[in-house]
Image (tube, coloured by chain):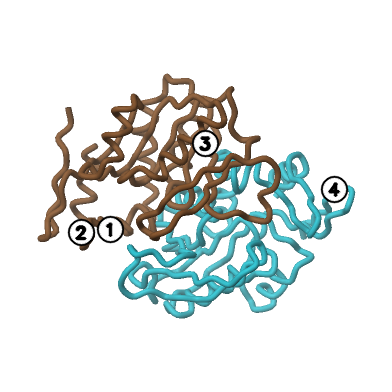
Chain colours: A brown, B cyan
């Protein structure tokens, strides 16, 4: 989607270690008008799929999930990264490795919020190696929920997550796919089909 | 606000240790229509205050902040709880004690997103002892930003956070104030003035 590529070109910053900082609008400061456009793009793509839940993972997926859920008129459910005292009862659990934080962590989702009756759209701000997404897919499998699609704002196309999900047959929509980032700060986006 | 009290009566669950679970609609599964009503209520209250930023803290404040920011047409900024490798540069930092998780943690906010030119509305899902809110106020103080108001969905009125903030002169709006929770699951709300 051109609107997101344009914004990344204007305000994204390339940093050593293949880091793309978009904290001005996507994951520290949040531009809600942009998030709304992202939500609308996912709705246009998946509106006829009988979606019953928007699933994401805390924290930076929550904003995109909320703006997407407004269009679908369905609830958001977000997987939690830490075990809270308040999160009792039966939960689905999966283990995720974070490259950003350099450690493994559990994600949990209360069983009452996802089951075999659900058709799920998974959304997140970034897709790179795909560890967080695989954890969410694992939870959908445990729940017996149908995965209708995956909506990503920014995919790092030079990392293997997106290719693996497409090969596995998931209907993945990445609004901007970064295929290369140069030492000079340049960003190369994948051409749309 | 009656809409939120009604929803808490219908779906909130009282648990030992003064825990009020509202994970069906506020902080694990998210009812975006309810969040939108919360955002609109904050807008009605603070729309004439020249708000330039909605400030909250990850994770469960993000959804309310986004729905509030839509009405104001201003960005959300959320304080982060963990130090990410991606969060470089100058940051404001404050220490917060979490009773839910039983530990201290740092919250950080990039300096470029908050400064003396800002007039801030702080929002969060819960206010109890007020540790997270005090951390955010500390960051506003470091930034030299003006705090125009504080919007809370659910205040635990039997804990000291709300009273302390009102005594300190903050314009605090809590949409539902729980004054007591009984062992039988009953919930007593404070009467509106």
**Residue in the foreground of this view, choosing between B168 and A85:** A85
The reply to whether discs 4 and 3 touch (Cβ–Cβ < 8 Å) is no
Same subunit: marks 4 and 3 = no
Q: Residue lying at the far right in this picture: please name it.
A: B184
**Residue in the foreground of this view, choosing between A66 and A140:** A140
x and y percentages locating residue B47 in the rendered image: 51, 57
Say if residue B90 shows up in the picture: yes
Tell me what residue is drawn at x 48 percent, y 21 percent.
Answer: A50
Mark with earlier residue (1, 2) = 2
The reply to whether discs 1 and 2 touch (Cβ–Cβ < 8 Å) is yes
Badge 4 marks a residue whose secondary structure is loop
Question: Tag on residue A139?
Answer: 3
- From the viewer's perspective, is the residue at label 4 or at label 2 nearer? 2
Q: Quadrant of the C terminus of chain A?
A: top left
Q: CA distance from mark 1 to mark 2?
A: 6 Å
Question: Tag on residue A14?
Answer: 2
Badge 2 marks a residue whose secondary structure is strand
Q: CA distance from mark 4 to mark 3?
A: 31 Å
Tag 1, which chain?
A: A
Residue linked to disc 1: A21
Tell me what residue is drawn at x 48 percent, y 35 percent.
Answer: A138
Question: Tag on residue B185?
Answer: 4
Q: CA distance from mark 2 to mark 3?
A: 33 Å
x and y percentages locating residue B120 in the rendered image: 48, 67
Say if residue A4 shows up in the picture: no
Q: CA distance from mark 1 to mark 3?
A: 29 Å
Q: CA distance from mark 4 to mark 2?
A: 52 Å
- From the viewer's perspective, is the residue at label 1 or at label 3 nearer? 3
Above or below, A168 against B169 in this view is above
């Amino acid at each position: 989607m051109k609107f997101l590529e344009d914004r990344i070109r204007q305000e994204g910053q390339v940093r050593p270690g293949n880091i793309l900082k978009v904290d001005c609008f996507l994951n520290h400061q949040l531009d809600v008008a942009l998030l709304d456009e992202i939500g609308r793009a996912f709705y246009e793509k998946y509106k006829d799929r009988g979606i019953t839940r928007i699933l994401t993972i805390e924290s930076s997926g929550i904003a995109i999930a909320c703006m997407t859920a407004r269009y679908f008129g369905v609830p958001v459910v977000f997987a939690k990264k830490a075990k809270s005292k308040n999160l009792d009862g039966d939960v689905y659990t999966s283990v995720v490795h974070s490259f950003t934080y350099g450690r493994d962590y559990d994600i949990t989702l209360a069983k009452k919020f996802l089951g075999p009756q659900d058709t799920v759209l998974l959304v997140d701000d970034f897709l790179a190696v795909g560890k967080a997404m695989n954890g969410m897919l694992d939870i959908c499998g445990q729940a017996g929920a149908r995965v209708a699609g995956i909506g990503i704002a920014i995919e790092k196309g030079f990392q293997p997550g997106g290719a693996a999900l497409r090969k596995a047959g998931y209907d993945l929509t990445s609004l901007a796919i970064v295929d290369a980032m140069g030492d000079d700060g340049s960003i190369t986006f994948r051409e749309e089909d």
